[in-house]
Amino acid sequence: MRSLFLFDDRVARSWHPFSTTRPVAELLFGALLLRERIERAVGLPARAILGCPELQGFSEPGAPPVFGARATYGPSGDESLILLSRWIPPLGSALPLPAAAPPTGLRLACEGTPVGWLLPAGRSLPSGDAFALGAGDTGGEPEVGAEMEIPGTVLPRPWTLMEQNPERIMEDLGTLYPQGHGADVAPLDPPAGVWLTGPHPVSAGAGVEVAPGVVLDSRDGPIHLSTGVRVEPRTHIQGPAWVGPGSHLLGGRLGSVSCGPVCKLHGEVDSSILNGFVNKAHDGHLGHAVVGRWVNLGAMTTNSDLKNTYGPIRVQTAPGPVPRDPVGVETGMIKVGAFLGDHVRTGIGTLLNGGVVVGAGSTLFAGPVVSGWVPPFSWVSAQGTQSVRLDAFLTVAARIMDRRGMELDEGVRELLTRLHGVSTGEGTGTSARGGRGGSRSAPKEGPFR
């Protein structure tokens, strides 16, 4: 028997604004979560995610538990396959591992980066130091007798998800649904008044509803509408595109997009990843962006994704797992939009500069263009930046999740509470804003739907 564990290394733990509230393995890329890609490659479900103690308590349907310290897992006698969450295996082929782990263990590498180990039964999991590894580090690793190069690639930064997403959708849909066919999936039989154009497949799961006046344009890539998707009139979908289960497209243009389950989208969404339960029900432009879960964008919220100099965009982000002391990082990319963490909310007319990083739990109101680095739990308005009050935030978050039949469970509450303390300095005297700052409650009512 063999058990699969995933881990976040030092690089993954600095994938702000997402890594403060979820493991990297639970981010969408193409048509699959990063975890789902690895599970398919090795033919095993992940038993746990290791190496990120700040995320203990994380819980979502289908996600394994998160543990941060060295521990003993599962029945004795299991081999342990431990893999880096940001390793991307080839889709459609099994990982070429030996049928049994060598007695001395095996180190796994991809493109020169250590990405895991295969340990024989009876060996302890690596220490926490090993999970903190970055590329080229070896301290804290278990002693092994051999190394094996495995195929795939390693994602260096969160904006790489956005940059490579169109190609990943193309590959995923071609592998998962060849010629538009798959388990409970078939080529879309469009009703009268729906326009299909282009050579690539347009596929749909069960219960998909597409209204007259919709354009499905597969000239540049395939399109997949997952189970229960509804598409309203005057919606133009340009492939490649993957629309997650239960999503509702309300009109506008979407292209080169991956959106997770239960998203409500309207307006222009281009070359972006929306990780699920995102509410963008009004006009506004979202381009070359990565958006966490439970994000609500007020009407006409718009992000820039191109400098007027047409030069590469620089991103302000924290260098380690703690969301403070950001530094500028050159992306080398001309088109970069916004990075919005979980539970971010914007008021009507909010403007976001290219490359902005907005921490989890923040609320932004119309005022100056929001740029650079916004720490978690920030209340940003024309009057300045304050801290969102924790109890008010948790009340609103639970209310929003309840509207989608979900619960803010105790483990996630504790995770968010720890992040709030680190970010605002409550109880520590320091904050990610460089001082103690004020605290502001979320509104009882506001411009959010």
Image (cartoon, rainbow, N blue to C red):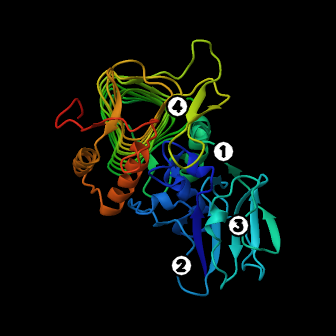
The residue wearing badge 4 is 271
The quarter of the picture where residue 133 lies is bottom right
Disc number placed over residue 140 in the picture, else none:
3
Residue 239: x, y in percent?
51, 33
- The label nearer to you, 3 versus 2, is 3
How far is the residue under mark 3 from the one under mark 4?
Answer: 39 Å
* SS type, badge 4: loop
Q: Which mark is residue 416?
A: none
Mark 1 → mark 2, Cα distance in angstroms: 29 Å
Query: Regarding mark 2 in the picture, which secondary structure is present there?
Result: loop
Q: Tell me the residue that label 1 is attached to.
A: 156
Q: Which of pointers 2 and 4 lies earlier in the amino acid sequence?
A: 2
Residue at 30 percent of width and 60 percent of height: 409
Disc 1/disc 4 C-alpha distance (Å): 19 Å
The kind of residue on which mark 3 rests is: Gly
Q: Nearer the viewer, mark 1 or mark 4?
A: 1
Image spot of residue 403 (x, y percent) = 22, 48
Crowd rating for badge 4 (residues with CA inside 10 Å; few <14, some 14–19, many 20+): many
Residue corresponding to mark 2 = 73
Tell whether 125 sits left or right of 104: left
Upstream in sequence: badge 1 or badge 2: 2
Amino acid identity at mark 2: Tyr
Q: Is residue 229 left or right of residue 391?
A: right
| Residue 362 showing in the rendered view | yes
| Quadrant in the rendering for residue 336 | top right
Q: CA distance from mark 3 to mark 1?
A: 21 Å
Mark 3 Cα-neighbour bin, 10 Å: few <14, some 14–19, many ≥20: some
